[in-house]
Image: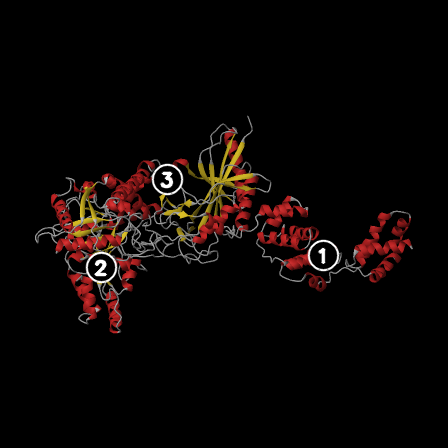
Amino acid sequence: MSRIIPTIGIECHVQLKTKTKLFSDTDNDARDASPNSKVSEIDYALPGMLPYLNKEAVRLACRAAKALNADVARFSMFDRKHYFYPDLPKGYQTSQMYNPIILEGYVELPSGTKVRVDHAHLEEDAGKQTHYSGYTLVDLNRAGTPLIEIVSAPDIHSAADARAYAEELHKLMTYADISHGDLYHGNMRFDVNISVSSDPDKLGTRVEIKNMNSFRAVEAAADYEISRQMKVIEAGEKVVQETRGWDDAKQKTIPQRSKENAKDYRYMPDADIPPVILSDEQIAEFQSGFPKMPAEYRAEFAVLGVDKSAVNVLLAERAIAEIVSEVLEKSDAAKAKKVANLIISTLGIADDSKKIKLPSVSDLITLAEMLMQGEINSNAGDKIFSELISGRENSRQIAKDENLIQVSDTGEVEKIVDEVLASEVAAKAIADIKAGEQKAIGFLVGLVMKESKGKANPAVVREVILTKLSN
Amino acid sequence: MSEIERIIKNIEAGKTTATLETESAILRAKADDSNAILEVIEERALERAAGIDKEIEQGIIRKLSGVPFVAKDNFLTLGSKTTAASKILENFKSPLQATAIERLEAEGAICIGKSNLDSFAHGGSTENSYFGVTLNAKDKARVAGGSSGGSAVAVAKGIVPFALGTDTGGSIRQPASFNGVVGFKPSYGLISRFGVIAMASSTDTVGPITTSVADAELLTEILAGQDKKDMNVMSDGFKPVESGKKYRVGIIKEYMADGVDKKVRDRVVELTEKLAEKGHKVIEISVPTAKYALPVYYTVVPAEISSNLARYDGVRYGLRAKDAKTIAEVYGRSRDEGFVDENKRRILIGAFVLSSGFYDAYYQKAQKVRTLLINDFNQAFNNVDFLIGPVAPTLAFKIGKNAHDPLQAYMEDILTVPPSLAGLPAISVPAKVAGDELPVGVQIIAPYVKDAELLNFARVAHGVEHE
């Protein structure tokens, strides 16, 4: 049997960080609001209500287009997608079926792989349902929140790349300041379409796994689904076209809806909303002041000489990338590398939920300088950095307060060296060195460091020992 | 002097008050036996009247100070229910008002009641009202027309000097014709639809029903103009024009065919003859695709209806079927019990023409023909300033005549839907008829956004007809 190739396409829903909803003046940030407290007559679909398009959402869509290397449609329109659901007040979702606002583009993964974006469109989110003791509770806070749905081409061929694509989209949307990108609150949700085929020119039967809100779930679900489908094919059976859900507890996909039960959404143009017609000038204005994208930071950080996965830690948040970039700009590559390494070693393993404060650029530069000039050792550097991210300021002051400055004063070091050299344990090492075994000096340096409780500058200690022994 | 003018003059002269006008209109509404008014708004109306009388004492007299009116019961109003003459909204109370109501109130008008209509404005007789038919102002055995039947009868019977209606395919013009009053359907987008229960989003319009064209002009000036809550409202608003210009008027050939009652056609011919005598140039002109307007309308409009009525699901407000256990039962039974047959018929047609595999053949094709119709109208308006023809193919018909023949009921709309699909302004001006004859209107249609010119000419035509 020839090799089986998985093919993956991803639809990603991104909640836009507009102040108000897509078609009403209701506050759009409902992340910690009590249920149904952010609902207006329009969101509630009271009789006689009409949509009023939020210009800011159009502006953000134009910026999203730029982040996706895509053109903005000069003419786009809204359509109604009909289905009955308690969390869908109007009985239709206002979306863009026929004339989306964002045209073809692409996303370049850190590996260099390009994933084409078929299109992306503006639409409103639905509310949320909770099932409770035999009842279904409906919260409409989210109903009417502006989304862009980014539809990729079927260009992804591994679960790892599916995750990389999802992560890169998240970076693009947060760097471009389009979304809060808060996955826990569902700011970005992924539908993953997967098929496997042994014929490289023909796609297999597609299965859609709906509504995942973590990168881990995207990867795990893709992994599971690829092997499930391969087993089906290897057993000589056919993959059924269907929609499945990801069960995070059981780590498997489960069937939800087959093709026979697929909904007919009866799309039609929404006559209540005039077409969105944008001129080149308007698009340019909407896209002006565009921030640096992850790919640009990656290119910039190449001089740091840290590996790709470490760079990804620096890019995990735009604010971190900005700080490293500023350190690089205001000092030099060596100091920036020190700072980068501090960030990578500390934040790379940090718990996501822990709130950290990002240090100021000047504190980081000072910290890097202190490390490079041997004023503090690397353990002290880590300690100061962790103080900085927990909210303290002024690296030098912290070093002093915490008694972390290394003893580089030769006089003081000499005193300790003299004591050590006079001790019994040092005798053999001294003899070895005099006999020409230079590596024994490390042992002596260690003894001095121990005696100084780690505060002595090891370079100075070494210097002093060598001077004393050569006399 | 127009009805509204008369009230304002009397208020200015201190011969009447807002309270007096409101009280007497309420009394007339309560005494009415034609089922034109579904609910009288008493408390809020009298409170507002008292407030306006205080203003008047201070010398503040607005364009409509103390003028009572009724609104079709698909306008959201405070102080009453808004039912759309349906069971599903039988007890619905709105927390806010339609922009049209707000604008009239800002000029001192007082809404004293809600008038009957075909449920959700689906129909042309008010026979589809969940609350029963409204009787014709002239002949109680006949229909009021519709869907704004209650509004037309309320004005024809002098309950109020004017009423608000909505016109999606003839719902202001046809009942105005059947009851002998002026009914104006403005250009699509001239008047805000915010707070009006939607029927078909691409053709819904709001307009006044009055006894004179002058009152229609006054009200349109107040009602028109940009509204942040309806994106389709044009910003220019409406300014009446006064012109003695001699116009070129085209009688639409297709509107004068045999299928149209001779009595109706004769009134059109008589009016055009009088206009010609006054120096206007009258010619016959063809709008060939007008004959396809009805099937186009009954494809596009039900599609929009099926969409706009999806929100009535028994979940958030309105009727929820008792003992419905599952969500499917809540939807199915609430909608089954809450809608009348005609609502359901249109929802089904709409769902069908939008369904996958049929969209291109029906909805899309209908939209293409609609574009051809618009082109045809534009072509005609290259040669004439206005088009003229009957409003409806018949006079007010007997109640129950079309009860078992929905297709025949749709045929009544054949002459009013073409301007609706093209978004054009059109007006029904009552023709002169003998005292014992049924009223009949003549329809005048103008190019898109030529609303002011249309009303100027309609004023002339109405004057010529009744001088």
Q: Name the residue under label 3.
A: A264
Along the viewing direction, whichever of B449 and B349 lies nearer the viewer: B449
Q: B121 and A211: which one is in front?
A: B121
Q: Name the residue under label 2.
A: B70
CA gap, disc 2 and disc 1: 81 Å
Residue A281: % across, % down: 47, 49
Q: Disc 3 marks which amino acid?
A: Asp
Q: Mark 1 is on which residue type?
A: Glu
Tag 2 and tag 1 share a subunit:
no
Q: Mark 2 lies on which chain?
A: B
Residue lying furthest bottom:
B58
**Residue A425 seen:** no
Q: Is residue B440 found left or right of B308 in the rendered image?
A: left
Of all chains, the one bearing label 1 is A
Crowding at mark 2 (Cα within 10 Å: few <14, some 14-19, many 20+) = many
- Seen in the picture, residue A261 relative to B200 is either above or below; the reply is above
Q: How crowded is mark 1: few (under 14 residues within 10 Å), some or many (20 or more)?
A: some
Instruction: Give the number of the disc on residue A369.
Output: 1
Which is more toward the observer, A230 or B439?
B439
